[in-house]
Amino acid sequence: MIASDFDGTLLGNDREVSERTRTALSRLTELQVEFVVATGRPPRYCDSIPKQTGIP
């Protein structure tokens, strides 16, 4: 299992998931590595991440 924070880790300064990060997350899925987001932000803040990454 890999856990990641949002700001400055999963999201860049533009508040978007980079292509490099999307590729890495896709590879985790291929390897069946569970990925979770660890944040103190409210759930509504997290709503766009599955859409940006392709990971539920």
Image: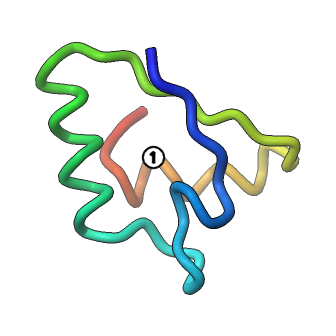
Give the quadrant of residue 40. top right
Q: Secondary structure at mark 1?
A: helix
Q: How many marks?
A: 1
Q: Quadrant of the C terminus?
A: top left
Q: Is residue 18 above or below residue 27?
A: below
Residue occupying image coordinates x 30% and y 16%? 33
Position of 15 compared to 22: left or right?
A: right
Q: Tell which of 42 and 37 is nearer to you.
A: 37
Q: Residue furthest bottom?
A: 14
Q: State the colouring used for the structure image.
A: rainbow
Q: Residue 28's spot in the image, x, y percent?
A: 24, 29
Query: Which residue is pictured at 24% across the width and 68% down the height?
Result: 19
- Residue at 52%, 74% (x, y): give it: 12
Residue 48, image quadrant? bottom right
Residue 39 pos. (x, y %): 77, 41
Quarter of the image that includes the N terminus: top left
Q: Which residue is mark 1?
A: 50
Q: Measured from the top left, where is residue 17 in percent x and y?
A: 42, 66
Residue 1 against residue 42 in the figure, above or below: above
- Residue 36's place in the image compared with 43, above or below, is above
Residue 27 left/right relative to 17:
left
Residue type for callout 1: Pro
41 above or below 21? Answer: above
Neighbour class for label 1 at 10 Å: few (<14), some, many (≥20)? few
Q: Nearer the viewer, residue 36 or 42?
A: 36
Residue at position x 15%, y 18% in the image: 31
Q: Position of residue 52 (x, y in %)?
A: 40, 60
